[in-house]
Amino acid sequence: QVRLMESGGGTVRPGGSLRLSCAASGRIFSINIMGWYRQTPGKERELVATIDGSGTTNYADSVKGRFTISRDNARHTVYLQMNNLKPEDTAVYYCNTDNLLYYNGDYLRQATDSWGQGTEVTIYS
């Protein structure tokens, strides 16, 4: 009923920039928290940044000052601007939404934890 689609991943050199986008599709009523997580092989998925409906943001210490999360509520889209990228930022980045309300027929449903398929980000010299 609801799908999250990420885009914007790629390969850049250290110090470069990338902008990730994630659009939620479906008959969406509202989304509370939107966020980005990342995962590398053999490691658990970790928080990168989140943003709630009022624009309050939260960042992992490792990306503070380099990454900026934002959202367009009308388009149900969240963005992650990544600057001054480092090799340790290499990962698959996943979009996440929490407390997403959507219409299924005439009924309002809640999706508590939804994930995109992931987009790869690679930084190397």
Image: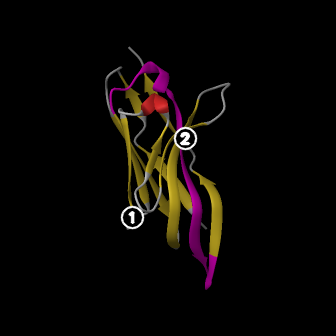
Q: Residue at x 66, y 32 (%)?
A: 44
Q: Residue at x 51, y 71 (%)?
A: 28
Find the magenta span and give its range. Answer: 83-108
> Which residue, given by chain and number where applicable, does mark 2 sit on?
37
How many angstroms separate mark 1 from mark 2 (CA)?
21 Å
Give amino acid for label 1. Arg
* Left or right of residue 82: residue 104: right
What colour-coding does the image apply?
secondary structure
Q: Residue at x 47, y 28 (%)?
A: 62
* Residue 89 horizontal/vertical position (percent): 47, 26
Query: Residue 75's mark?
Result: 1
Q: Residue at x 59, y 58 (%)?
A: 98
Q: Is residue 71 above or below residue 59?
A: below
**Residue 40 belongs to the span the image colors magenta:** no
Q: Is residue 112 above or below residue 70?
A: below
* Residue 111 horizontal/vertical position (percent): 64, 64
Give amino acid for label 2. Tyr
Q: Element at badge 2?
A: strand
Quadrant (top left, top right, bottom left, bottom right) of the N terminus: bottom right
Disc 1 residue crowd, few under 14, some 14–19, many 20+, Cα 10 Å: few
* Residue 53 horizontal/vertical position (percent): 45, 62
Q: Element at badge 1?
A: loop
**Residue 101 belongs to the span the image colors magenta:** yes
The quadrant holding residue 64 is top left
Q: Nearer the viewer, residue 97 or 63?
A: 63
Any part of residue 79 in sight: yes
Q: Nearer the viewer, residue 7 or 63?
A: 63
